[in-house]
Image (cartoon, rainbow, N blue to C red):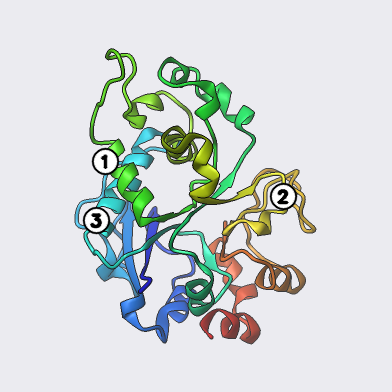
Amino acid sequence: MIKLAFIFLIYDIINHEELWHMFFKNVDNSKYSIYIHYKTDVKLKYFNEYKVDKPLDTKYADISIVKAQNHMLEIALKDVNNTNFIFVSGACIPLKSFNYIYENIDFKYSYFHIADPEDSLEDCKDTLNYINKKYINKASQWCILNRKHSLLLVYGAKFNKYLFDKKYTTNYLVWFNNSYAPDELCYITYLSFIYKDNLNKEIIATYYNEPPESATTFANWEGMNYKYVSKKELKNYIHISEGELKHLLYSTCFFGRKFKPSASLSLRNNYYIEYISS
């Protein structure tokens, strides 16, 4: 039986906690787990019980983010029934119902939204001291991991297995310790290093040059191939039009970001709520 582990990485609140409550409300709780890592302990209305006891200190675009993700994976892996591990932020919203996601996810694979590898090299100068350039990849932090890959990633960061000499450690936290935004680099690169030419048999990939709604987690960046593309950098939604919202609901993405609390006014309509809670 598939059991989905939702791992929330938040600063203090879940911007649209009410919507997530509706998303989970009528679902058999044997089908999911929830884990929440936070920076500031603000009491949540519905999900406070799911917070971890000891969150790690984190900094923006720092290796500490990956360590926090690994910490959460390690906790979630203790439940032997968890098959897939879904990372979402406090600014994410559901764009499909739980049942739709549950029926359409394939537990055998991990899901990544991948950038052009050349885009990552400027951030990986030290990494080239450890591994070949051909293994370096970049992907959205908001991935979905299967259990096999989650175990590989947790244990791959725990040990310094050296190749030939101490310069060539296989610990990917060392590879990216001095990189910018290693949360976009570590997981996909380590799996590329492990599986080499067989990576495409292990993951379901979408790509940055494709429409962003093809990813499991939608984000609207300037310059993307998207009907409602952002005019400046990453769009932080304070409002979404009915046309764009319906476009996303009928696309293939499961979740969307970044939706600020004020966006709730345009999300509180019957067709959206019915769609995510059916």
Seen at 73% across and 67% down, the residue is 244
Residue 225 placed where, x, y %?
A: 77, 50
Residue 245 drawn above or below residue 229: below
Residue 36 placed where, x, y %?
A: 32, 60
- Contact check, label 1 and label 3, Cβ < 8 Å: no
Which of the two labelled residues, at mark 1 and mark 3, occupies the earlier sequence position? Answer: 3
Closer to us: mark 1 or mark 3? 1
Residue closest to the eye, 54 or 158: 158
Closer to us: mark 2 or mark 1? 1
Which of the two labelled residues, at mark 3 and mark 2, occupies the earlier sequence position? Answer: 3
Label 3, label 2: how far apart the Cα atoms are: 34 Å
Which residue in the structure is indicated by mark 1? 155
Q: Amino acid at mark 1?
A: Tyr
- Report if residue 100 is visible in the image: yes
Question: Which element type, helix, strand or loop, lies under badge 2?
Answer: loop
Residue closest to the eye, 9 or 34: 34
Which of the two labelled residues, at mark 2 and mark 1, occupies the earlier sequence position? Answer: 1
Q: Quadrant of the C terminus?
A: bottom right
User: How packed is label 2: few (under 14 Cα within 10 Å), some, or many (20 or more)?
Assistant: some
Which residue in the structure is indicated by mark 2? 210
Which residue in the structure is indicated by mark 3? 75
Count of numbered marks: 3
